[in-house]
Image (spheres, rainbow, N blue to C red):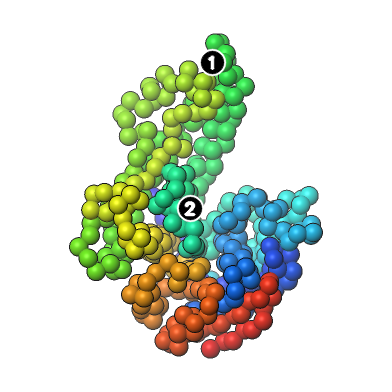
Amino acid sequence: IKEKTCNIACMLLRKLRCFHFKNYTSIELNFATQLNCIIGANGAGKTNLLDAIHYLSLTKSAFNTIDTQNILHGETQMAIQGYFLRDDKSYDVKCIVDRDQGKTFQVNGKAYKKIREHVGQFPIVLTTPYDTELIRSTSEIRRKFFDSILCQIDLNYLNTLIQYQQVLKHRNGFLKMNAGKLNVDRALINSYDKQLLPLCKQLYAGRKAFIDIFYPLLQQQYEYFVDAPEIIGLGYESDLDNAEFEQLFFNNLKEDLLAQRTVLGIHRDDYTFTLNNYLIKKFGSQGQQKSFIIALRLAQFACIHQALHCKPLLLLDDIFDKLDEQRIERLVYLMTQQYFGQVWITDAGGKRSATILKEIQADKALFKIESGKLMGNVVL
């Protein structure tokens, strides 16, 4: 994995503005430098604010990647603006989505030629109630999780992944057009294969090397949250594990035509999570699964910090619904020791947030949201 040359020793999001974004007509928030608690009833828009920060970092929503569907109903355009401070330099980051004109991304008034160049400049880690899908759902969810880390810390990996997805899309389009045919344009399919296979091998090598870096961090985080002699495992499974993959790929064209898609390749990779050598999704208790998920996210935090030499923004959505008192206490302890940088917590009830705010000596703020409006902003 190539480490970016990045001197973001200190990175902060000082202000956030949203205009016609999801359920917000207009809102502006000035954040504390360490801990920000956002409280409000379910559906008020707490998570939407975290998603706006996700947009400013990764150029897209964490929940709905169709940009126009994040525009406030009845409106034609949305805008998200964030004011970052990085190594004493100010950055005005703006995302605008127009139903007709599409999406533009600017930093200090200058638009990117390719929006993906922005990824990794202001890294984040977001944990949500949907994180249980990392254990329980399909391989696609797990691939996206690990790819999201790799893309933030290695621009070459991001570019390779995008190229692979584009070539794969064209190859699958060819297979659909020629479904059921005995004779196909071999020269064209070979041209796709010559592009696809080197990209496939590069991604495989990147993912395999990454696991060696990530696994020790995952072990460390899990051991911190669990007082038990449990052995966790992280495996990586790929079609490319077979030394004869390339020949198998070429020989599989008939099956590809029948399936109307590319059957073998890096897009089928999966990651396995085990506890004492058993799959955690089948044999892990609810508490063990919750601990594993928070360990995954904190390992993500540690990995990005290690690679980019800066602490990513940490967004904890409804974290109190995931963890028991013991694990919450351990997470709060990390906050009191300033293990993290700038943190956001959403809380429907507000009681847990109030307790944490009292316990932690830090620059902190409390925001109350009701129906897409800021009803209170207290810097503590």
Q: Where is residue 62 in the image (x, y as percent from the top left)?
A: 56, 57
Residue 153 seen in the figure = no
The amino acid beneath tag 2 is: Ser
Q: Residue at x 51, y 20 (%)?
A: 258
Residue nearest the viewer, comparing 373 with 269: 373
Residue 345 seen in the figure = yes
Q: Picture quarter containing residue 83? A: bottom right
Q: What element carries label 1?
A: helix
Residue nearest the viewer, comparing 206 with 174: 174
Q: Is residue 376 above or below residue 63?
A: below
Q: Position of residue 277 (x, y in %)?
A: 23, 49
Bin the neighbour count of mark 2 within 10 Å (Cα to Cα): few under 14, some 14-19, many 20 and up. some
Q: Is residue 26 above or below residue 70?
A: below
**Mark 2 or mark 1, which has the lower sequence index?**
2
Q: Position of residue 1 (x, y in %)?
A: 39, 50
Q: Mark 1 points at which residue?
A: 186
Q: Image check: 81 left or right of 251? A: right
- Dot label at residue 148: 2
Q: Position of residue 112 (x, y in %)?
A: 65, 54
Bin the neighbour count of mark 1 within 10 Å (Cα to Cα): few under 14, some 14-19, many 20 and up. few
Q: In this view, does 49 lie above or below 178?
A: below
Q: Which residue is drawn at 26% across and 49% down?
A: 278
The amino acid beneath tag 1 is: Arg
Q: What element carries label 2?
A: helix
Q: Image check: 244 left or right of 152? A: left
Q: Image check: 95 left or right of 216? A: right
- Dot label at residue 286: none
Q: In this view, does 333 lie above or below 308?
A: below
Mark 2 vs mark 1, CA separation in Å: 35 Å
